[in-house]
Amino acid sequence: FQLPMNNPAGYSIEEGNAASRNAYNWSKKTFANRAGKPGEPAQDLDGGFSNEIRFGAERLGISSDGIGTKIEVAERLNKYDSLGYDLIAMTADDLIAAGFVPTNLSNIIDVNHLDYDVVDQLMRGLHDAANFAQIAITGGEIAELGNRIGGWPGAKMNFNWCSTAIGVLHPSLAQPLSGKTAQAGHAVVALRSPSFRSNGYSLARKTLSRLFGENWHDAPYDGPDQFANWGEAMLEPSLIYSPGVAALLDAGLPLHGIAHITGGGVADNFKRVLKNGLGAVLDNIFEPFPAMQRLCEIGGIDAETAYLYWNMGTGMLIVTEDASAAAVVASLRASGYLAQVAGHLTAEPGVTLRVAAGELRYA
């Protein structure tokens, strides 16, 4: 498809959303195949971060994702042992956003040619991330596809890495979290993201290449973080939120919707759980972490663009009752996460972000 000429990332979020909706519409035409049988899909989670499949009384969640072009950063640095955190975060946090506690993961690595040591690093990191998230890795595949797989020319191995994870609906929930029980006045709690996670790398790589040339990963990093170069700053792994959110559910705290902030930025993802015409004012979300802020400064990236493509320091938004907001924050902090009340839901639709750069409004 034709991209807008002024598109800074080189791809269209709107076109991607439209293609995703169309793909899901085709998928829904298959739901009748399992109606009334084991594996029956839910019919009411359109637009969610994962979907539900039912096996009798057991309600499972399923989610699939990959880590995109962040792989190129690892190829450039010849360092692969942190990508497992990105792979698990993308699916585990999609599951917990609907109240499914992640349990199992299957993954597939498509490679141009096999390098044992690179695969060993990948799987060692996946093992560590799975232990953090309390997930069992119960399936996988490695496929050698020759020149069908490309990447950075200097890498030992070019590859793509995707996974599918399943989880079980938390026993405290009668139905998955979708946002439909949220009400105006409910509080929104933000979880801080200390990295780009695994989204927005097309814009980031394009900007770094424009600033520093082909070997941008070796360019010295001049922000306050302790990174030697821009490659290290961009490879910082994703923080997995599912254990902290599962602890909220274990404690019986009332949750009404959760948005995992991935591609599409804060507002686009949060709107996925704003049902019944509700909107939100977020006037206390986290500041962009230093590497992201520095890239905006040196790359001339305005706030509107940055908040459209990146998480800007906020990796998850949780809707809870105003009276429970302090307890939700305290529990997340006790689990080792940085969390704060970020705003509230409104009866008027649309998302308003009040950030250091000004007020950003999204219909």
Image (tube, rainbow, N blue to C red):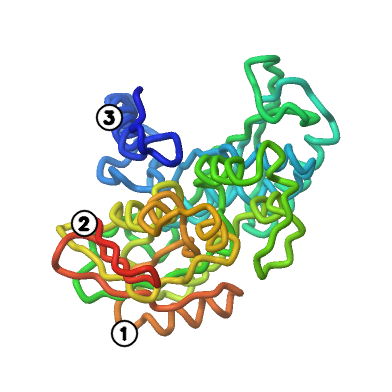
Which labelled disc corresponds to residue 348?
Answer: none
Q: Residues within 10 Å of mark 1 (few under 14, many from 20)?
A: few
Q: CA distance from mark 1 to mark 3?
A: 39 Å
Which element carries disc 3, helix, strand or loop?
helix
Q: CA distance from mark 3 to mark 2?
A: 19 Å
Q: Closer to the camera, 101 or 54?
A: 101
Badge 1 is on which residue?
Answer: 323
Pointer 1 or 2: first along the chain = 2
**Quarter of the image containing the N terminus?**
top left
Q: Closer to the camera, 236 or 129?
A: 236
Which element carries disc 1, helix, strand or loop?
helix
Q: Residues within 10 Å of mark 3 (few under 14, many from 20)?
A: few
Which labelled disc corresponds to residue 275?
Answer: 2
Image spot of residue 150 (x, y percent): 65, 23
- Pointers 1 and 3 in contact (C-beta within 8 Å): no
Image spot of residue 219 (x, y percent): 72, 50
Pointer 3 or 2: first along the chain = 3
Residue at the image position 70 percent from the left and 15 percent from the top: 146
Residue at the image position 63 percent from the left and 16 percent from the top: 148
Residue at the image position 52 percent from the left and 60 percent from the top: 297
Q: Closer to the camera, 157 or 297?
A: 297
How many labels sit on residues? 3
Is 362 on the left or on the right of 129, as rendered?
A: left
Badge 3 is on which residue?
Answer: 25
Q: CA distance from mark 1 to mark 2?
A: 21 Å
Pointer 1 or 3: first along the chain = 3
Image spot of residue 118 (x, y percent): 80, 36
